[in-house]
Image (spheres, rainbow, N blue to C red):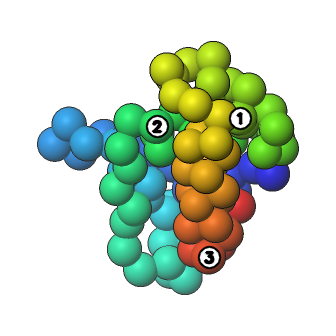
Amino acid sequence: MKIKAHFVLKEVAGKPIVVPVKEEAVNFSGIITLNASGKFLFEQLQEDLGEDALLARMLDKYDIDEETAKSDIEAFIKTLKDHGII
């Protein structure tokens, strides 16, 4: 899975946010604010990656147990899918 081309990561007032651009700006109302791990996952999803690859990268980056990381990744992916971002 991969982030659609018309969603970009920006920093506003020191906080990472996802912003729709071009035709997605017409279809998507609002922005999504990310925490540090959400920003990391969003950046990783610039490549076409599966959940196993995301999990491996998250475990490499953060001091977190596998169960928590997997749960966080699943919730993040669900949010992105619900908003049509991936």
Q: CA distance from mark 2 to mark 1?
A: 12 Å
Q: Nearer the viewer, mark 2 or mark 3?
A: 2
N-term mark: 2 or 3: 2
Q: Upstream in the sequence, badge 2 or badge 1?
A: 2
Query: Residue at position x 49%, y 63% from top?
Result: 20
Q: Which mark is residue 37?
A: 2
Q: Is residue 46 above or below residue 1?
A: above
Which residue reaches farthest left? 13
Callout 2 secondary element? helix
Q: Which residue is mark 3?
A: 82
Q: Badge 2 local density, few (<14 within 10 Å), some, or many (20+)?
A: some
Residue 32 tag number: none
Q: Is residue 32 above or below residue 50?
A: below
Tell me the amino acid under the disc marked 2: Ser
Direction from residue 15 to residue 3 in the image, left or right: right
Vertical relation: 5 (above or below) 9: below
> Callout 3, which amino acid?
Asp
Going from the N terminus, do you reach mark 3 or mark 1 first?
1
49, 63: nearer the viewer = 63
Residue 18 screen position, x and y as percent:
44, 54
In the image, residue 85 lies at what x, y percent? 63, 64
**Which residue is at 43% across, 58% downward?**
19
Q: Is residue 13 visible from the viewing direction of this image?
A: yes
Q: Along the horizontal axis of the image, is 17 left or right of 14?
A: right
